[in-house]
Amino acid sequence: MKPFSIQFALTVVCLSTACLLPLDSTAQFSSPLAGGIPAGIGPGIHSPNSPFAPLPERSDVLPWSVLSDVKTKAVKNLLLPVFPAPVQALNDKTQRVQGFMMPLDPGEKQKHFLLTSVPLTCSFCTPGGPESMVEVKTKSAVKYSLEPITVEGKFAVLNDDPFGLYYRITEAVSVK
């Protein structure tokens, strides 16, 4: 059941991100089943049309501007991420990321959720593409919050995730 939750969330990303584009945009979207939204579309870029300001950069957390610096390439019917060297260097290292919690399951406490670069505006929508979120799996449950949270754990850069995710943190702990 959990993989369905992630797939559903990422499908909603593909449908909801169109709301973040300027009205005169001519961007073409790929099918959610074909790999997701092209990188560079969504709040990871923090366009002037976004209703949210980016989180202030902190020296103790990985900035979203680094995570959103990703391109895509078409391979068969998929759009796969192409990560620059600084992003690839983050793989398999302990990282801290600050963001907004998007629960994947009901409940006050969460062990598996998405961390997003901007807050949710709708409980059925995510605020951007895969470059603006990180899948988080924690050691112990974290209480849901509308405020930004910071997590630290083993960071993975995902080259061909079946659900279209670009990043994952495992063995995460909440950091104050």
Image (tube, rainbow, N blue to C red):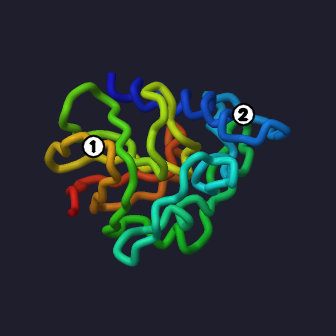
Which element type, helix, strand or loop, lies under badge 2? loop
Instruction: From the top left corner, tell me how far across and down residue 62 is, in percent.
Output: 42, 68
Instruction: From the top left corner, tell me how far across and down residue 40 is, in percent.
Output: 68, 53
Viewer-closest of 148 and 42: 148
The residue that disc 2 covers is 30
Give the vertical position of 22 relative to 53 (above or below): above
Q: Quadrant of residue 149?
A: bottom left
The residue lying at 54 percent from left, 67 percent from top is 66
Instruction: From the top left corner, tell me how far across and down residue 3 is, in percent.
Output: 39, 29
Q: Amino acid at mark 2?
A: Ser
Of the 4 image quadrants, the one containing the N terminus is top left
Query: Looking at the image, is mark 2 or mark 1 earlier in the sequence?
Result: 2
Instruction: From the top left corner, tell me how far across and down residue 12 is, in percent.
Output: 54, 28
- Label 2 crowd bin: few (<14), some (14–19), many (20+), radius 10 Å: some
Q: Is residue 71 left or right of residue 141?
A: right
Q: Amino acid at mark 1?
A: Ser
Which element type, helix, strand or loop, lies under badge 1? loop
The residue that disc 1 covers is 145
